[in-house]
Amino acid sequence: MPSRSVVIRAEGGAHARPVAELVRLSLAHQGPVGLTTAGGRSVDLGSVLAVMDLALVPGDEVVLTAEGPGAERLLETLAGVLDG
């Protein structure tokens, strides 16, 4: 499964606007998309509440995963959202 490690640089961390964009992109993808924190908590990126519950802040490192067609391109786009 393709994955990408990302350090969150978006101002304010993963607040409502970037989380909504992550979820929108994930739901449009034809396969599972996930996020795992450095502490080992994993969530489905299709759930706004699950991602918001992680309370991610700038400097946190996460690993994004995706399966299906276009997974690498999706990971690049998701990483860009978190890069701010």
Image (cartoon, helix red, strand yellow):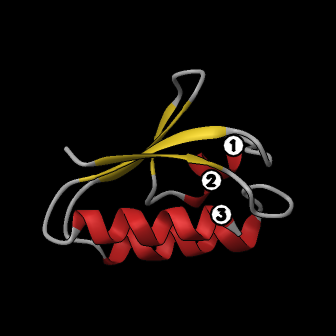
| Nearest-to-viewer mark from 3 and 1 | 3
Farthest residue, direction top: 39
Q: Is residue 59 left or right of residue 19?
A: right
Q: Is residue 3 left or right of residue 83?
A: left
The residue type indicated by label 1 comes to: Asp
Q: CA distance from mark 2 to mark 3?
A: 21 Å
Q: CA distance from mark 1 to mark 2?
A: 6 Å
Q: Which is nearer the N-term, disc 2 or disc 3? A: 2
Secondary structure beneath label 2? helix
Q: Residue at x 43, y 75 (%)?
A: 25
Q: Which residue is mark 1?
A: 53
| Nearest-to-viewer mark from 2 and 3 | 3
The residue type indicated by label 3 comes to: Asp
Q: Is residue 55 left or right of residue 4?
A: right
Residue 49, label in figure: 2
Contact, mark 1 vs mark 2 (Cβ under 8 Å): yes
Residue 68, label in figure: none
